[in-house]
Amino acid sequence: MSRIRDIDYKILFELMKNSKISDRKLSKKIGVSQPTITRRRTRLEKNIIDTYTVIPSWEGIGYEIFAITLVKVKPEVATKNKSKIARKRGLEFLMSQPNIIMGGGCRGMGMSVFHISLHKNYSDYDDWMLRLRSEMGDLIEDAQSILVNLRGKELLKPLNLKYLAGTK
């Protein structure tokens, strides 16, 4: 793909604020023709935009807990032969857990894997943690979670990608 231009950033950031905006409204907002917007939007959708999605009110759909889980894999798992098998098992587990919305390798604090997950309540989180330990426990040395109360008064800035539209 050719390098991304300023107009493409403007389009992308406007779409992050409101992915439902029409090409006509977007062209008026940015100050270029509607066919240019349509052409560039199509290119962005092909090369840059992974997907359009909805970020719901978590409480509105019944989720109370947002968890960031950090996992330390046992050192003996890091050997060349064992790491391929462990990675395959980890990926299978990760993909079988619909409540995990993002996960993968990480660095820092002695941890090597992270999961970001949503849970209906503490009991749901606890059941998930038991599944993690029972299914992957032979590979895990430690697992620690940070729990965020999605209904709490301390959630000051809810998850939304529209905030990125303010960056340059």
Image (cartoon, rainbow, N blue to C red):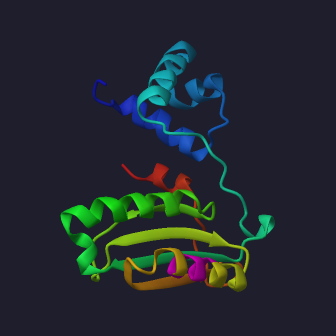
Q: Residue at x 59, y 26 (%)?
A: 28
The answer to which image quadrant residue 64 occupies is bottom right
Question: Is 165 rendered above or below residue 156?
Answer: above
Describe residue 125's horizontal placement relative to residue 166 as left or right. right
> What residue is drawn where x is 36% and y is 49%?
168
Q: Give the residue at x 39% y 57%.
A: 88
Q: Is residue 21 above or below residue 149?
A: above
Q: Nearer the viewer, residue 116 or 31?
A: 116
Q: Position of residue 18 (x, y in %)?
A: 63, 42
- Closest to the observer, 162 or 152: 152
> Is residue 129 found inside the magenta-colored segment of the image?
yes
9 sits left or right of 1 in the view: right
The percent position of residue 139, horizontal first and vertical second, equals: 38, 76
* Region of the chain picked out in magenta, as a range: 128-133
Task: Give percent across and percent down for residue 158.
Answer: 60, 68
Q: Decide whether the magenta segment is chiefly helix, strand or loop.
A: helix
